[in-house]
Amino acid sequence: MIARLFSKTSTNHSLPSLGRGKGVGPLLGLLALCGLFTVTSCDDMLETDSDLYVYADGDNLADPTDTIYSMVGILNKLQPLADRTVLLGEVRGDLVDLTPYASTDLQQLASFSISDDNAYNNPRDYYAVINNCNYFLAHADTALKNNRGERIFEKEFAAVKGIRAWTYLQLALIYGRVPFVDEPLTSTQVNEADYPLVDLNYICQYFIDDLMPLIHTELPGYGEVGSVDSRFLYFPINILLGELNLWAGNYREAALSYYRYISTRDGVGTSWPLHNYKAYWDEDEITYESFIDGWEMNCFRTESYSTGSELITLIPGDSISTSPYYSSLPSLWNTTAGNDGYYSLTPSAAIINLSKAQAYCNRNAAGEISYAPTNLPNYLTGDLRLRSAWYTSTRFNVGEGRPQYQLMYKHSGESPHVHLWRGSMVWLRLAEALNCAGFPQFAYNILATGVNNNTIDSLQNVYKADSVWLEQFNFPNTLHVLRTESLTGYTTIGVHSRGSGFTEWNEHYTLPMPEDSTATLADIVAHQQPIIEDLIMDECALEMAFEGHRFYDLMRVALRRGDYGYLAQRIAARRGEGASAGIAVDLTDPSNWYLSWQGRIGY
């Protein structure tokens, strides 16, 4: 029996809280005016009386009010996953190190010795989301139309399917093998044999098939919720399909899925360039003491929805510290009054060294190329994004025995919400998919120069056999203006230029070519693909460190290459060459990458 996973029902009448912090209160206030609703609660894996189903009275969702209540209930169930998504993806990777003040639970994550009672090893929270989604999908009347002939629940139906797919993907990445249930369960009489464990491949294929019919379906918009646009509360279908196909090895399909998001994010017939948010030295910089920072401000501090906004998806949190939905990330990363200066997480030697190793290229108004010094203090050497996101100082008196002052802008606590997806992630995933699909030069252009239709034209001359396939990509030259085309009017840059200057003219960052001048296109592609893949993974680290992606990026490449040492070696080097990373297991055995719980889930 799996009664602890999916179990008995009971009923109470109370409104689930999305938290009292900015961005959630007004919506709940609106919903409170609509009346009471029913919560069905079930015992689950780890505890009893966990509210698993949130829906209106009756067995069918046939009224818009029912739908809003159900959506709020599902979003409520996502909240316990917010911090965990970031921490499981980073603390187990190579870009984060622990301070001596980290909790036992975090120490277990970092060492891969995670016990059943670890606070981050809690499968019940994922199944709470899944069961709420399953109930909605089983009971929403999707045939119901309004007086204009529009399906009333169509957008919510797509949003819920997206949330369920994202949650199952997280489960599969964390545990490796998971019980699969696609129906609402409300009884204690559940036969475990009816729900066998499935792996990542099964999850990917199931949800690729499940989501493909929804690629043109809009997601719901409830307007502004406090200071947050409700469109940030969902997982866009085309990005999900990109992720699922990328993990499944369907690289062309993954690339087209990411492209569909880019080309429809602001409506049909639009396009969404990688915006030129960057941390950079002035072109005439001499002293190299103070850089100009347009990266962290635009990428992490903004929660307004616009054609230029970087943010895609967040999970809402509470601004009241006593709330169970109050994010712990600011206290784990920053010097605060709440932690008395004893923060737990800090950038690792691996990310510091990677950042320093980048050659920052400058170009002045006369077109002269120079490179920033390689011995600058205060983490200013090399790529500027690490310094843009992370600030330390000994000037502040934090007390005897305490670590120096630290501020991590990516998790500063200015917002109570946890950001999960943003624009550069989509472009980097597109580059990864294109490289694996056999178009390494296309991928390189995303890193180095940006892309537009002029780029596509040149690529069609390189990959002539695939010119028809490449025609599917439309990056209008008027919207995607490259810096090589206009130094004053450009609208997009390569991802690497967000922190390393004028990559287009950087002689240390070039497209790799085989030495053999007689090499065929197949030889060139085979030579370029692993090199470009390494560049992409380095760029993912420089651009997205500490955001929850790193361990899974390493996992995906290791699985693709069939080289498990790829992951093991990088994590072993998180503290620098020759220093122990404190790993308790053999990471060349992929079964040790996953969590387990009492032998019921995982390996």
Image: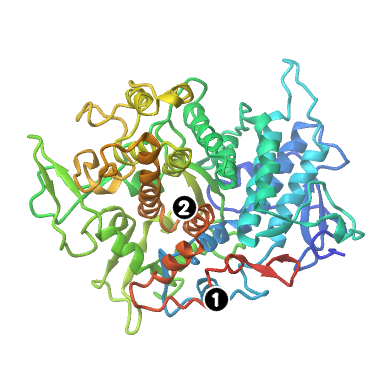
Amino acid type at circle 1 is Val
Give the side of residue 326 with respect to residue 310, left or right: right
* Kind of residue at disc 2: Ser
State the count of labels: 2
| Residue 30 visible to the viewer | no
Question: Residue at left 38%, top 52%?
Answer: 534
Secondary structure beneath disc 1? loop
The x, y position of residue 254, in whole percent, is: 54, 38
In this view, the residue farthest toward the right is 189
Q: Which mark is on residue 560?
A: none
Q: Position of residue 148 (x, y in %)?
A: 72, 15
| For residue 184, above or below residue 603 | above
Determine the secondary structure under disc 2.
loop
| Separation of residues labelled 2 and 1 (CA atoms) | 37 Å
Dividing the picture into quadrants, the one containing residue 1 is bottom right
Q: Whole-percent x and y of residue 558?
A: 50, 57
Q: Which residue is mark 2?
A: 415
Q: Dot 1 corresponds to which residue?
A: 585
Snapshot quadrant of residue 363: top left
| Label 2 vs 1, first from the N-terminus | 2
Q: Is residue 314 above or below residue 574?
A: above
